[in-house]
Amino acid sequence: MLRLFLPPNLALTAPRDAVAVRVELDLTVAPSPELVPALAFLQRWCGQDSPPQFIQLTRAQLRDLISTLRGQPLFFWVNRPSASIPWCGDVLVAVSDHLVESKPKESAIPEGSLESPAAFRRPPSTSTPMTVDGSEHFLALTLPSREHANYAAALDLVKTHGFMLEPSNRKWWLRDRHKTLNFLAAHRDRLEAEFGAEFTENFARNTTRLRSAEIVAEASEAEGGYAVTLGLRAGSTDDTELRAALAGNRGYVESGGQVFLLEKEKLRRLGEAQRALAGEPAGGLAARRTQRVSAARVTETENILAELSPGFAPPPTWRARSSALREMSALASAPMPSALASLLR
């Protein structure tokens, strides 16, 4: 038996090639022949015979799964697990459309052709994007050209974070290791996603020691439910040093010859998840927090952790409870005395 649960925010995660998929797989019985190609994909991507409960897939990988499982009612939304996602021919409704690689639109009338009115002809764009050079010790940013749509925002970014303009080369410099690492932790993803920045080969060579801290989740059985621990992992860095970095607004820690960035967006998502598990909207961020979760909340907790920590592997009893709560109609009826049954009838 195989069931694949997709996140309700697929439209947002698919363009980032980071689709968190929950896998329910029962290998106690031999899989049917039509499932074998999909299982082969999962084994190859995960590097193990049985895939973990949560995996993160790219658009191409999810397209491959959909193609091999065409027409089979095996895909579900995490928040609507009782009804499979419908098919329309070879298309998985509300899913396949988000997995198409975007292509630039082509003009119906070729540019410069006789049919193209001169009033609508445009010269080729001469704007240049932002360029990022440097290392873990300094940064040298070349802003996009003035006609670029993000020029004003880029100029404001460097001015508000201590960069200084070098008139001889028109580069904005940040010459301080602590400020450089904090800036990268807070804005590295933004430079690429929002500003379309290009990172030089020199920058790539000089930042091979930089890594991103991971969000990890663990669960163990406890009286009346489970103990769920959610926090950061940065190599072998201990919790004390992580707490000190968070308390001092330091966006990095160092461990084993590597520098781990505590990325701003990742910390925001971790804090939201910790507050949701604790039921405390005003709670603070912790480097590592253990929260008691009742057995009735396992499904809710899974939904919180699905995208945040794709490698989350709960105990077997958790999986059994979660499956039962998602498919309550499949549960066997409780035994009822015959006298009571006849009275209710």
Image (cartoon, rainbow, N blue to C red):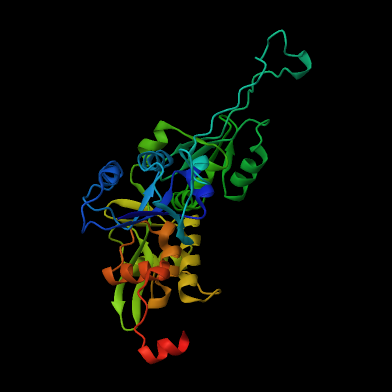
The N terminus is located in which quarter? bottom left
Residue at 21% from the left image edge and 56% from the top image edge: 29
Image-based side of 158 in relation to 315, left or right? right
Single out the residue that lies furthest toward the top.
114
Q: Is residue 292 visible?
A: no
Q: In the rendered view, does 176 fall on the left or right side of 145?
A: left
State the residue in front, 292 or 100.
100
Quadrant assignment, res 58: top left
* Residue visible at 26% across and 54% down in the picture: 256
Which residue lies at the image location 36% right of the left edge and 88% below the top edge? 338
From the top left corner, tell me how far across and down residue 54 is, in percent: 35, 56
Residue name at image x 60 percent, y 27 percent: 105
Q: Is residue 317 left or right of residue 292?
A: left
Total marks in image: 0
For this rendering, which residue is in front, 208 or 102? Answer: 102
Q: Position of residue 162 (x, y in %)?
A: 57, 49
Q: Is residue 247 above or below residue 111?
A: below
Instruction: Using the image, determine if residue 312 lies above or below residue 116.
Output: below
Give the percent coordinates (x, y) of residue 324: 37, 70
Answer above or below: position of 307 versus 43.
below
Q: Quadrant of residue 69?
A: top left
| Direction bottom: furthest residue | 339
Residue 20, x across and y down, in percent: 41, 53
Q: Is residue 280 shown above or below 65?
A: below
Task: Identify the residue at the far right of this view.
Answer: 119
In the displayed structure image, the side of residue 343 where residue 254 appears, left or right:
left
Q: Is residue 330 visible?
A: yes
Q: Between residues 32 and 212, which one lies in front from this camera angle? A: 32
Q: Nearer the viewer, residue 206 or 11?
A: 11
